[in-house]
Amino acid sequence: MAAIVNETARSDEELAAEIARRDASERAFRAAREAFEGLYRRHAPLLLAFLSSRVHASDRDDLHQDIWQRVWASLPAQFQGGNFRAWLHQIARNAIIDLGRKKRPAPLADPLTLVDGRSEPARSLLLEQERKDALERCLKALKSELAELVRARLGGDSYADVCGRLCLRPEHRPTSCSIWQRHNSKPAWRELWDEARRAGNS
Amino acid sequence: MKLVALEIPDDPALLPAWLEGHLVNTDLAALVAELEAVHGEQPDHLSLTDVLRDRRDAVLSRGLAALPAEGLKSLLRNPRLLLELQELILTEGGPCWLDASAEAAGKQDDLERV
């Protein structure tokens, strides 16, 4: 992955310092707005990806906006220098927790340990539970050989490795994601998938 | 419902970029859920530290190409580690990750405009 970021760009901490000085004058305020936009452009995409994995899609954009409002409002008094991204991450974590409290979700059974060592319920996985359940049902309905093929393929094994291990003939090697098509089971897969989706929607 | 995991590339050499794309995009939770349906929940009981080992800094600065194939397989087989890795990237990922996320967001904006 090649980096294309302008190496001469000001650091996060320099931009944050500019924002913290914003009340001094009209000129300082304008400079602060520009610095804030710079931080936003640099970090908003990754933050949005992070939020997408942890809150429902319908809450994501509002939460994202709320976090940046918190950054603008609290940076002068609360950011004491140091790692801006760690501080942004902390604000995001707090905002997610606040959102969870507001929504009073049902008790969650499956804790997920995060990078900082604290536990957070695996909300994102619960949000995708329907997807997970449907796929599990489909896998159970596949022939064992095909299910094993899917597991190996989605475990990062190459097709050559998988087919060799399962003694599949090379000409039967599937390409791309069409595992089921080459094994004459794609229609079956589709049928199972439709059934799973119907079950998920009922 | 589109299955994200089934788009996994044939060529193992393309796997790092494919995973990176999901780490900086808005569909990682879907991918994790699908991989969990296939492999179960943390079948190997590995931590992110176990997987990254001495490549942690390299992954943060250069991306997943710095991780051996076995490390990539461990991430796929223990997909919750992808969520942890995404969080680590948010706080410590280098310019390559920021660039990748900006590119992904740009593509998403283009799609939404169509």
Image (cartoon, coloured by chain):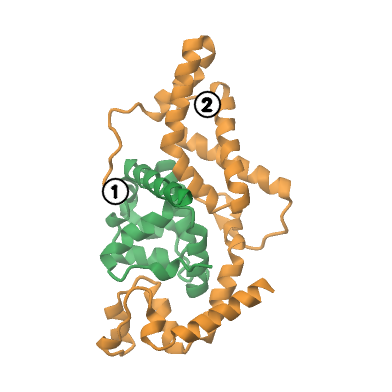
Chain colours: A orange, B green
Q: Residue furthest front?
A: B114
Residue B11 relative to residue A48: left or right:
left
Which residue is identified by label 2?
Answer: A79
Quarter of the C terminus of chain A within the rendering = bottom right
Residue at 35% x, 63% y: name it: B72
Q: Position of residue B29 (x, y in %)?
A: 52, 59
Residue B28 relative to residue A7: left or right:
right
**Occupied quadrant, residue B93:** top left
Q: What chain does mark 1 sit on?
A: B
Residue B36 relative to residue A107: left or right:
left
> Which is more toward the observer, B25 or B2?
B2
Residue at 27% x, 90% y: name it: A169
For the residues labelled 2 and 1, the Cα–Cα distance comes to 29 Å
Q: Amino acid at mark 1?
A: Arg
Regarding residue A76, the answer to whether it shows in the image is yes
- Against A104, residue A110 (above or below) is below
**Occupied quadrant, residue B95:** top left
Which residue is identified by label 1?
Answer: B62
Q: Position of residue A157 (x, y in %)?
A: 33, 74
Q: Residue furthest top?
A: A25
Residue at 58% x, 63% y: name it: A128
**Occupied quadrant, residue A66:** top right
Q: Amino acid at mark 2?
A: Phe
Q: Residues within 10 Å of mark 1 (few under 14, many from 20)?
A: many
Q: Are marks 2 and 1 in contact (CB under 8 Å)?
A: no
Q: Secondary structure at mark 2?
A: loop
Regarding residue A149, the answer to whether it shows in the image is no
